[in-house]
Image (tube, coloured by chain):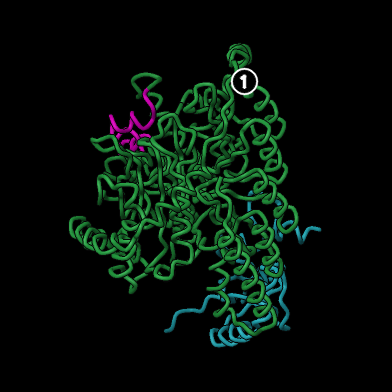
Amino acid sequence: MSRRFTPKVVTANLLREGDVVYLTTDDRWSALHQDAELIDDEAHAQMRLLHAAAQKLLVVGAYLADAKPGPKGPEPTHFREEFRTRGPSNYNHGKQADLAS
Amino acid sequence: MYSYSDFDEAFVRTRVAQFTQQVERRLDGSLTEEEFRPLRLMNGLYLQLHAYMLRVAIPYGTLSPDQMRQLALIADTWDKGYGHFTTRQNIQFNWPKLPDVPAILGALADVEMHAIQTSGNCVRNVTADHFAGAAADEIADPRPYAELLRQWSTDHPEFQFLPRKFKIAITGSPNDRAVTKAHDIGLRMVRNAAGDAGFEVMVGGGLGRTPMIGVTVREFLLEADLLPYVEAVLSVYNTLGRRDNKYKARIKITVHETGAAEITRMIEERFAELRPLFGGNDMKLLEEITAAFAPPAFRNAPTDAYDAFYKADPTFRAWADTNLAPHRDAQYAIVTISLKAHGETPGDATSAQMRLIADLAERHGHSDLRISHEQNVILPHVHKSDLPALHAALATAGLATANVGLLSDIIACPGMDYCALATARSIPVAQDLATHFEALKLEHEIGPLKIKISGCINACGHHHVGHIGILGLDRAGVENYQITLGGDGTETAVIGDKTGPGFAYTEIIPAVERILRAYLALRLEASETFLQAYRRVGMDPFKAALYGSEGAKDAA
């Protein structure tokens, strides 16, 4: 039996601003992790990653990050990805500030 | 201080113009990210966790007030109003946007600064003793040599694609404040039997995943032989260095694999070839550079006001006791401005703080500023009679924390709050340690202590040479902190010893408290420092304090 595939989201940084973004089902880049397309099929994940990597004028460094379903949408499973959803812990900068305003 | 020659100016401006066009070509799609990445890194621009980061070199840690003001302007105009000073005597801006970076580099060039060679496999920013030119124990100001090395290594055609990055540190004092033994090349000024000044040359030091103390390849090198000798070291490394394996590519591995005796022989052999090719222009240049570092006209004035204030004001006295160091002119002091206010981010300064520091350097400090690898700002030349006014002005901006050399004067790398390489956070650990021990009012009782925190194995936070070192790791998807004890970054450099299993994020502060309570209980007298006590009693009592007596046995 093959190993079970851990669900993924496609994430990257915006080329111009550097902000963390997530690929949505309808091919947008959202600042919110919960808007991301949660992918539970490995082949589809690779297709979506290729689609993301092709958008060279929009994003940089696209990759697949582990995620899990949550009440509002996908949630990160690793603390690194959790930090990327909000920003640094020493200042109210990054998403935690941008999305609040 | 050194001012750019026409050549320097033209070189930096050309690079700004080139990078401006490279950014344009990236943004219009003519360059792919794969093509652009090495170009941006050559200009100090990284992509980090939440944003881009621009790393700007502060050569040998020396800044003028105008340069400091320009950093403040950059922070306000294109960033979030602050900058982060690093253990490499650089400043990092954490939030620039790619289209703005050419303008930032232009603004830096306006004050003779740049971000060139702050990344990549080349000779990086040459670091130096932050008390250079002022320290009472100094043989000579190391900065002219550092500037000579900077000019020689900038865009050096032979050394732009080394096996790995290359860091040189230099101190003009026998007491090493520049961690020279943990650099690829460490230069420590010494005198020979005849009384001539020269350098002890150490090669192959470094921290990171394979920490090593540099080995001395030359006990005494004449000043006139500096460039050909350093070139010989680089040349041997460039030939032997392991380009096949990134983790074995630093010169410390080359030294280790080749053996100290053999690599010394090879360096000397190469040096014998190179020495005759240096016709003396390097020494002429050094002479010109040295003139630019002439000491300021020190004032001769009474210092009784300082003495009286010291006696009368306990707050000032506490600050003077920790934040001042002996100057070679007895009427002067070297002032360390702590960027470690309890609970703040180590090494961060707001634009307002930068401007105030620049003003105070002009008013009280002969317009000289330094950034230390310990992430503080130094005013190297302050007349003692100016100290009360200086202290009062610093206090208005949260810059008068009296903690230099104490527990809360912590080195911390940006860690996983910013860095894409990090495996755990460092900054909040430093903040919590500082506030926790401040609340316990134990900091002054504990006395001299260097805590250094890195958020990954690359050791930007110098944890291996901390008296207490903390290394943040990712253990099965959870932040975990490994402790080392007994490290030392001075002329008696030692890599610290691991205590045993690491601690979770919520357990690391109590763990450090157990270590320090054990120290307070076992020290012979108040003047026995933590490091001295550790050297006397070894690891066992601290292991017992950390893990309980059974844990100590298991870990041993």
Q: What colour has chain A?
A: cyan
Q: Could you tell me if residue B507 is visible in this image?
A: no
| Stretch in magenta | B528-550
In the rendered image, the vertical position of residue B312 relative to residue B431, given as above or below: above
In the rendered image, the vertical position of residue B406 relative to residue B221, given as above or below: above
Instruction: Identify the residue position indicated by label 1 in the image.
Output: B385
Q: Within the image, what quadrant is residue B103 found in?
A: bottom right
Q: What kind of residue is marked 1?
A: Ser
Q: Position of residue B156 (x, y in %)?
A: 44, 66
Q: Nearer the viewer, residue B89 or A71?
A: B89
Q: Position of residue B422 (x, y in %)?
A: 50, 59
**Residue A90 left/right relative to B517:** right
Q: What colour has chain B?
A: green
Q: Nearer the viewer, residue B269 or B549?
A: B269
Question: What's the magenta bit mostly, secondary-structure-wise?
Answer: helix
Q: Residue at x 50, y 42 (%)?
A: B374
**Residue B289 left/right relative to B173:** right
Tell whether position B529 is magenta: yes
| Classed neighbour count for the residue bearing mark 1: other residues with Cα under 10 Å, few (<14), some (14–19), many (≥20) | many
Q: Residue at x 38, y 52 (%)?
A: B183
**Residue B421 left/right relative to B283:** right
Q: Position of residue B532 (x, y in %)?
A: 33, 29
